[in-house]
């Protein structure tokens, strides 16, 4: 089943048309994203009326989007608007005019709905159990608090990155004094919401301002992995970005690598908000979610239409999508996983490596996507496996977990492992690196034991002495191809455990 859905998001700073495609088993993928920096907030008069120029800008943008929608032949289009239209004194007239001139029926989101959809997006794309979310728009800022993945509190503040600049900044970027005024103003608002104070949980940020700050930080530290979703920062990282770009002129900010030109005048006010919230919450970390309000609306509508359920098992859904995309044999994965688990349990009892339940969970995940690079090219499958898994977004797991997954699933031997891990040596301790190699070696042997994919091995026993690990394998069928391949692969485990491996095959 293939399903296309267009979503128009009329914000205070930008208006976007995003087109998503849904394929059964693969979830939603963004296939087109058109942005117009309309700055509707600039057209809100002192009396709170959206001016004629602002209305013209809105109509002109929507008519352009209408041409794209017609070309794409989209059967479903949702159009939502947030703070600026919501706060406009002439909102009713604007909505009626838009309907008449463009045919679009705008859903004017309430403060609760705007916060709720952001929460829905976070729950559908991360596995975080408890956090504060923040979405800084152009004209409002929504925060929520969720625990056990259930929404507990929400609040909407009447300021955003663009409105703060318009209210406090005389030039294009704030002076030191203006930054202090912004911080004092924002902190006063935050302290009126008791459930934010000293909550000591992660902050999950969504929206363009958060993406911009993360992109700039990744550029500054030459971050070696691709992807923004679930990128983590701490307060020192936020202050690093603030300090590094705070002394730049507006001209140089516009040219700053990884910062969109149209956010050059709002990034600094936004960072003041992030810092203020981090300190108010006494947060444990700052995490970016690439999925935000638009995806929240999409997920809710897909659930209402029975296309996909609300509140899925995010991690398992992510792996199912990868397996579908790379046409992984699911029966083989079951065989590989079962054999790898049996070997893991014996090694856990016998080897000096301190294996934990987290290591078993990593092994099971790695078995699901083991050697998927073969789909691209069999000769260089290990390299492709590592690159794909290390550099694609996998909802529900952190960047560090993603790296470990890539190293285990692509394991080919010590030489290639050293090559892959070289840019990330500071990410993993020596003990963690040894565990990753052990898990990778286990998968290599387990793969060999299923060389013909007949599920030959039914039971594994293992014993170890000072110099040797003996693995006894009871088989239901002829096992010579499996024996040949396992003998070839056992050297990887020998190098990690520093013992001889003896494989003893027997037929049941």
Image (cartoon, rainbow, N blue to C red):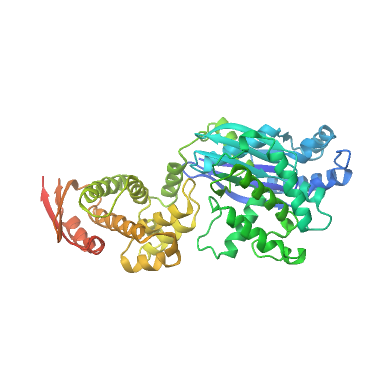
Q: Toward which corner of the image does residue 173 lie, by quadrant?
A: bottom right
Q: In this picture, is 155 found above or below 217?
A: above
Residue 225 percent location from the top left of the image: 50, 60
- Of 318 and 130, the residue lying toward us: 130
In the image, taking residue 132 as reference, residue 453 lies left or right, namely left
Residue drawn at the location 78% of the way across and 58% of the way down: 175
Residue toward you, 405 or 336: 405
Where's the C terminus, which quadrant?
top left
Total numbered labels: 0
Q: Position of residue 452 (x, y in %)?
A: 23, 53
Residue 11 seen anywhere in this rendered image of the structure: no
Specify the quadrant of the image occupied by residue 93.
Answer: top right
In the picture provided, is 252 more to the left or to the right than 115? right
> What residue appears at the point 63 percent right and 57 percent down from the top-left corner?
239
Nearer to the camera, 48 or 8: 48
Relative image position of residue 91 (x, y in whole percent)? 81, 35
Whether residue 29 sits left or right of residue 40 in the image: it is left
Q: Position of residue 17 (x, y in %)?
A: 68, 47
328 or 312, which is in the foreground? 312
Whether residue 280 is visible to the viewer of this picture, yes or no, is yes
Q: Is residue 485 above or below residue 84?
A: below
């Amino acid at each position: 089943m293939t399903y296309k859905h267009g979503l128009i998001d009329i914000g205070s700073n930008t208006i976007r048309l995003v087109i998503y495609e849904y394929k059964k088993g693969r979830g939603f993928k963004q296939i087109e994203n058109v942005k117009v920096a309309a700055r509707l907030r600039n057209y809100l008069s002192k009396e709170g009326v959206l001016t004629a120029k602002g209305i013209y800008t809105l109509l002109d943008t929507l008519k352009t989007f209408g041409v794209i929608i017609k070309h794409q032949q989209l059967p479903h289009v949702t159009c939502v608007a947030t703070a600026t239209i919501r706060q406009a004194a002439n909102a009713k007239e604007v909505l009626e005019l838009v309907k008449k001139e463009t045919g679009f029926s705008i859903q004017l989101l309430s403060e609760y709905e705007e916060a709720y959809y952001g929460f829905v997006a976070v729950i559908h794309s991360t596995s975080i159990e408890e956090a504060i979310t923040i979405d800084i728009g152009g004209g409002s800022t929504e925060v929520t608090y969720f625990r056990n993945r259930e929404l507990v509190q929400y609040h909407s503040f009447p300021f955003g990155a663009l409105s703060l600049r318009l209210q406090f900044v005389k030039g294009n970027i704030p002076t030191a004094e203006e930054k202090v005024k912004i911080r004092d103003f924002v902190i006063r608002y935050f302290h009126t919401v008791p459930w934010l104070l000293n909550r000591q949980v992660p902050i999950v940020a969504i929206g363009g301002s958060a993406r911009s700050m993360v992109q700039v930080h990744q550029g500054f530290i030459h971050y070696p992995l691709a992807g923004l979703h679930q990128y983590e920062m701490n307060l020192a990282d936020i202050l690093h970005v603030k300090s590094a770009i705070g002394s730049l002129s507006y001209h140089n900010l516009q040219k700053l690598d990884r910062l969109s030109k149209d956010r050059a005048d709002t990034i600094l006010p936004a960072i003041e908000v992030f810092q203020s919230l981090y300190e108010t919450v006494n947060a444990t970390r700052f995490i970016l979610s690439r999925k935000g309000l638009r995806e929240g609306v999409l997920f809710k509508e897909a659930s209402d239409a029975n296309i996909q359920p609300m509140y899925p098992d995010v991690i398992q859904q992510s792996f199912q999508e990868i397996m579908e995309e790379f046409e992984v044999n699911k029966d083989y994965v079951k065989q590989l996983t079962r054999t790898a688990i049996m070997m893991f349990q014996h090694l856990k009892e016998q080897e000096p490596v301190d294996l934990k339940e987290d290591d078993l969970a990593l092994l099971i995940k790695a078995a699901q996507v083991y050697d998927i690079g073969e789909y691209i090219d069999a000769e260089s499958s290990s390299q492709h496996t590592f690159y794909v898994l290390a550099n694609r977004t996998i909802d529900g797991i952190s960047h560090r977990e993603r790296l470990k997954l890539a190293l285990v699933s692509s394991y080919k031997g010590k030489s290639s492992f050293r090559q892959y891990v070289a840019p990330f040596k500071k990410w993993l301790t020596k003990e963690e690196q040894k565990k990753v190699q052990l898990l990778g070696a286990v998968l290599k042997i387990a793969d060999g034991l299923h060389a013909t994919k007949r599920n030959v091995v039914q039971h594994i026993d293992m014993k170890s002495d000072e110099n040797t690990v003996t693995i006894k394998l009871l088989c239901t069928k002829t096992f010579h191809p499996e024996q040949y391949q396992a003998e070839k692969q056992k050297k990887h485990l020998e190098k990690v455990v520093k013992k001889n491996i003896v494989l003893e095959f027997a037929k049941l």
